[in-house]
Image (cartoon, rainbow, N blue to C red):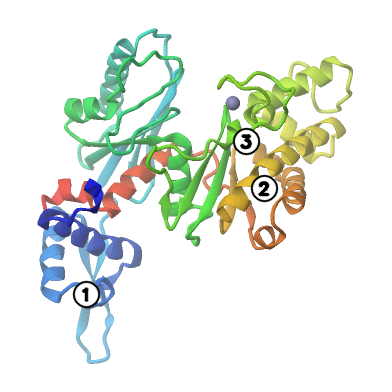
Amino acid sequence: MKESHQIANVDLVKQMNSAAVYSLIDQKGPISRIQISEQSQLAAASVTKITRLLLARGLIKEVEQQQSTGGRRATSIVAERQAFCTLLIQLGQQQVTFAIMDLSAKLIKKNQINLPHFTQIDGFEQHLITLIRDFLAKNHKKSIELIAIGITVSGFVDNKTQHIHSFGNFPLSTPWALAHTLETQFNLATFIGHDVRSLALAEHYFGATKDCDDSLLLRIHRGVGAGIVINHEVFSGHKNNVGEIGHIQVDPLGRRCLCGNVGCLETVVSNSAIENKMQQLLEDGYQSKWLSLDSHDIEAICKASNKQDAVATDLIEYAGVQIGRVLAMSVNMFNPEKIVISGEITQAQNILFPAIRKTLESHALPDFVKSTPLVASELKHEDIIGAFAIIKRALLDGHLLRRLIKV
Ligand SMILES: [Zn+2]
């Protein structure tokens, strides 16, 4: 029998009960203790004890509700979101974004910094720690308590150990324990996740898939990846990483991909792939009223396609067909309630989405496709919210709560 199947111990039960109470307050507040007890099926005495701890820590507060029918004022509880903040880090090899957000997901400060080239991870980590110290010294107001660090990386992360197994071109002889290092350095609970998978979670908490149990988010940016939410949780599986649909082959005679194979979806529809293809078309003499060899980045291509520019429209439609082919396989496999596309390319959604849908309809099971909406991300360019989502998850599942209220 595996470890995870062992009977939960007392501490774990306490953590789960506290998490159940806090989640109800966070999501359904204002809510009364009686309602919490009914909805969580916890004894009234347990609810009272847990809310006392949460009140003492300032994580929740009491508010007077409307007069109840008996004339007595009912006291309800809401989550306190403005008194606490989080440090968010979105880490790439060449660039890092830092942000401070409060618990209502309000952005207080955000900074993007280009990183110098490092050949070894130790030097890179030291530089990162210095940058974090500087950012906090300049931007963190002591009046708002900093309670956690959330990091997302464009690399494989082991969700159980919180170790990074691959990151950019760095040769990692052993898994990189960045989260543990930051936890020690800053004495803050630290949570780490894959950037696209975390974005799928953010979309579920705050965006287009709030109303869904299951969903699929396809992220198109520098690379192409997906996050699959099943039953309100990001599916990661025993091997920790699921959703690399950017590396499904769509062109057997295509370009070599960073993964070593050829013709992956990423080599056809990533921002740079589309920009390079447009460059090639313009060099070959294709005419565009809006694009030139000097100006054909993804945003310009989307704008041109929205103005019915023929070459831009053809290229976006072509991308839509390739995306549709890969999504069709995913729909047949997972049958999600909703598909979300995230990335700059959604600025051309009037052209892109019909091409995706038409391909989906001819490549996936009709019954699956017809009931699956295809929408653009509602998070737009706030990638950093992925790092906030993993902190939010730790709050709702009790991992962070346990640290804060010492249950
Ligand atoms: Zn690939």
Q: Position of residue 146 (x, y in %)?
A: 23, 39
Is 76 above or below relative to 139?
A: below
Label 2 to label 3: alpha-carbon separation: 22 Å
Q: Earlier in the sequence, mark 1 or mark 3?
A: 1
- Image point (70%, 42%), residue name: 325
Q: Position of residue 293 (x, y in %)?
A: 78, 16
User: Which of the two marks, 1 or 3, is nearer to us in this view?
Assistant: 1
Label 2: element kind: helix
Is 24 above or below relative to 64?
A: above
Which mark identifies residue 328? 2
Label 3: element kind: helix
Q: Quadrant of ligand 1?
A: top right
Front residue of 112/251: it is: 251
Which mark identifies residue 344? 3
* Crowding near the residue tagged with mark 2, few <14, some 14–19, many ≥20 C-alpha atoms within 10 Å: many
Label 1: element kind: helix
Q: Earlier in the sequence, mark 2 or mark 1?
A: 1
Q: Position of residue 273 (x, y in %)?
A: 68, 24
Return the residue at label 1: 37
Instruction: Kindly indicate whether the residue at mark 3 contacts the one at mark 2 (C-beta within 8 angstroms).
Output: no
